[in-house]
Image: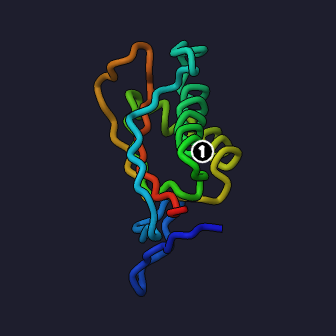
Amino acid sequence: MSRHENILPDGWPTPKGYSNGILGAKGRTLFLAGQVGWTSEEVFESEKLIPQFKQALQNIVAIVEKAGGSREDICKMTCFCKDRDQYLESRRELGAIWKDIMGKHYPCMSMIFVVDLLDHPALIEIEAVAVIAAE
């Protein structure tokens, strides 16, 4: 169960797959650098979007957990993707990966399509902000 409060103005439709606003509970703020789809040894096991998305999302959760939080503490994510068409074609598979890793937790999110990413052959990079309850 989330310790944070979803903010939805009266009369607005409930967004699908993200939140418009999350009010973080009192706690420590964790800022996560962009994570690409490589392993902890910085090895890309695939040059395809779906497995890179899965690994990048697992990397985000691993950092949050190392800081003492959980996936539900993630309040904001920004995704940078190199291939809009591949992303749109893969949304069903990406959604299944999301549910497997994140459950029904949907932070505030932005998807930005970019020309390139620093770490080749990265197709997606995810950065995040989490608020982890004070101990």
Q: Amino acid at mark 1?
A: Glu
Q: Residue extending furthest front?
A: 135
The image position of residue 90, as x and y in percent, is 57, 36
Q: Quadrant of residue 21?
A: bottom left
Is 70 situated above or below 25? above
Q: Residue at x 67, y 49 (%)?
A: 99
The image position of residue 58, as x and y in percent, is 60, 36
Q: Residue at x 64, y 38 (%)?
A: 93
Front position in the image: 20 or 41: 41
Residue bearing the label numbered 1: 65
Q: Horizontally, is 133 left or right of 124 in the view?
A: right
Badge 1 crowding class, 10 Å Cα cut-off, few under 14, some 14 to 19, many 20 or more, is some
Q: Quadrant of residue 91?
A: top right
* Quadrant of the snapshot with the C terminus: bottom right
Q: Residue at x 31, y 22 (%)?
A: 116
The image position of residue 65, as x and y in percent, is 60, 44
The image position of residue 106, as x and y in percent, is 54, 58
Q: Residue at x 59, y 38 (%)?
A: 62
Front position in the image: 46 or 11: 46
Q: Horizontally, is 1 left or right of 133 in the view?
A: right
Is 108 situated above or below 35? below
Please tell me whether mark 1 sits on a helix, a strand or a loop.
helix
Q: Residue extending furthest bottom?
A: 10
Q: Horizontally, is 41 left or right of 84 in the view?
A: right
Front position in the image: 4 or 26: 26
Is 64 situated above or below 47? below
Q: Residue extending furthest left?
A: 115
Is 14 situated above or below 126? below
* Quadrant of the snapshot with the N terminus: bottom right
